[in-house]
Amino acid sequence: MPDGVISIDDPRADDVRALLERHLAHARATTVPEEVYALDVDALLDPAVTFFSYRAGGELPEAPLRKYSSNLTYDPAAGMRIRP
């Protein structure tokens, strides 16, 4: 995966919104309702929330992130999704 940047992002951006919609659809299709903890765009706009994304060349990645840093690892079981 090319080097990229993790930075504060706008959950209203078209590509981020599409990613969040796919993530929520998957979470709702595969998890009982009381255990879907993913936030939608409106919830992510709460002033108490700071939303970050990873971008390589200005784009959200095409493949799953396996490692965010030397200390943080992607966990598919946690339901983290990125653009397919």
Image (tube, helix red, strand yellow):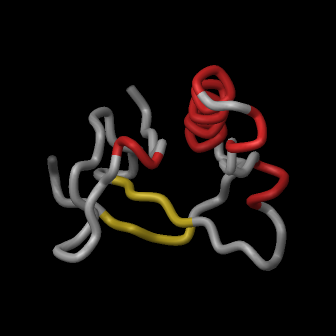
Image position, residue 55 (x, y; %): 37, 54
Numbered marks: total: 0
Please tell me whether residue 72 is drawn above or below residue 28 in the rendered image: below
Image position, residue 37 (x, y; %): 68, 50
Q: Which residue sits at x=35%, y=42%?
A: 76
Q: Which residue sits at x=46%, y=70%?
A: 7
In the picture, measured across the screen, residue 41 lies left or right of residue 67, that is right
Nearer-the-camera pick, 45 or 57: 45
In the picture, measured across the screen, residue 67 lies left or right of residue 42, that is left
In the picture, measured across the screen, residue 1 lies left or right of residue 78, that is left
Q: Quadrant of residue 72?
A: bottom left
Q: Which residue sits at x=67%, y=53%?
A: 11
Q: Name the quarter where the C terminus is drawn.
A: top left
Image position, residue 27 (x, y; %): 61, 32
Please tell me whether residue 50 is drawn above or below residue 58 in the rendered image: below
Nearer-the-camera pick, 32 or 11: 32
In the picture, measured across the screen, residue 12 lies left or right of residue 72, that is right
Please tell me whether residue 3 is drawn above or below residue 20 in the rendered image: below
Q: Quadrant of residue 62?
A: top left
